[in-house]
Amino acid sequence: MNDRGQISAEYILMLGFLIVVILLVASYAGEQNEQNSVASSVRQGATSAVTELSILNRTIQPVRVNGVNMTSGNDIIITINLSDPSLNLEQKATILQGSKSSLEDQGFSVAGNGVPIQNLTFNTSRHSYLVIVT
């Protein structure tokens, strides 16, 4: 500031540059936060369902969730990888139902497709998601 209380142009330019940088970082962080929240919810629900299957059905081998993989882009495919891919459709539907419950607990509106459920679909303001079990 000079002695008349005016702000110099350098201060205004610097403030404008900082605001642009903050907005860019915030938009990127918001998108990553959404994807992390979705992946975490899917994994948590699948893990709970797999545990329930193992406890209630002693005839199946113990199964665990090996990973949750996501593709990139506007249409994101989330694949739940299990240690035993030989589960039947009903057991996979139970795992998807667990993921659906977990996602709904986080506030997402999820639709299950098929009877028994073969995949989950839902949309957010940023992406469309498809969840499948392999």
Image: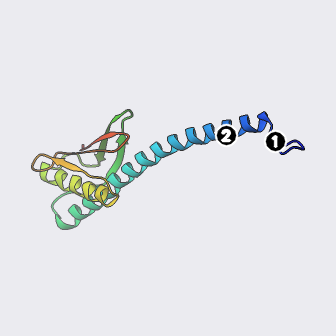
Image quarter (top left, top right, bottom left or bottom right) of the N terminus: top right
**Mark 2 touches mark 1? (CB < 8 Å):** no
Q: Amino acid at mark 2?
A: Leu
Q: Residue at x 35, y 34 (%)?
A: 74
* Above or below 8: residue 100: below
Query: Would you place residue 70 above or below residue 57 in this image?
Result: above
- CA gap between label 2 and label 1 equals 20 Å
Q: Residue at x 46, y 48 (%)?
A: 33
Question: Secondary structure beneath disc 2?
Answer: helix
- Mark closer to the chain start, 2 or 1: 1
User: Above or below — where is 66 with respect to 15?
Assistant: below
**Which residue is labeled 2 in the image?**
18
Farthest residue toward the front? 4
- Image quadrant containing the C terminus: top left
Rendered location of residue 124, percent (x, y): 33, 45
* Residue 62 visible within the image: no
The residue singled out by tag 1 in the image is: 6
Q: Nearer the viewer, residue 20 or 56?
A: 20
Pointer 2: residues within 10 angstroms few (<14), some, or many (20+)? few
Between residue 36 and residue 44, name the one nearer to us.
36
